[in-house]
Amino acid sequence: MKNTNPMSKDPYSNSSTLKTEATRILAHQLWERAGCPHGHDLHFWHEAEQLLQESTHTKPSANGSGNGSLRRRAQPTAKKSPKSV
C-alpha cells in the first residue's frame, strides 16, 4: 500500500522550501542584531534574500574556502570633529 499522507514527506526536500527557511532564519537574525525594531519585517526579509543570493554567487578562492560567508555589513560611523590645537 502506498503512503499518501502529505505529512510524511520531508518538509526540507524542496529547494524552494530550503531557500525560504534559510531566508527566514537569516532575516530573524538580522532583525535581532538591529535591536528588534517594530515594522521592518520586509526590510530584513529582502536584506536576507540579497545576502543569501550574494553568498551563492561568489566563486571559491584558490584555497577552496570561497567567499560565501555571510558577513555583517559595516555600519556608518559618526564623523569625528577635528581636535583643537
Image: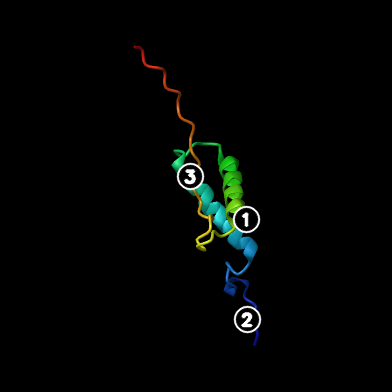
Between marks 1 and 3 in the image, the one whose residue lies nearer the viewer: 1
Q: Residue at x 49, y 36 (%)?
A: 37
- Specify which label sits upstream in the sequence, 3 or 2: 2
Q: Quadrant of the C terminus?
A: top left
> Which mark, residue 57?
1
Residue 9: x and y in percent read 60, 73
Between marks 2 and 1 in the image, the one whose residue lies nearer the viewer: 1
Few, some or many residues within 10 Å of mark 3 (<14, 14–19, 20+): few
- Tell me the CA gap for discs 3 and 2: 45 Å
Disc 2 marks a residue whose amino acid type is: Asn
Few, some or many residues within 10 Å of mark 2 (<14, 14–19, 20+): few
Disc 3 marks a residue whose amino acid type is: Arg
Q: Residue furthest left?
A: 85
Element under label 2? loop
- Tell me the CA gap for discs 1 and 3: 17 Å
State the residue position of label 3.
72
Above or below, 54 relative to 9:
above
Element under label 3? loop
- Specify which label sits upstream in the sequence, 1 or 3: 1
> Which mark, residue 3?
2
- Specify which label sits upstream in the sequence, 2 or 1: 2
Residue 26: x and y in percent read 52, 51
Disc 1 marks a residue whose amino acid type is: His
Q: Quadrant of the N terminus?
A: bottom right
Element under label 1? loop
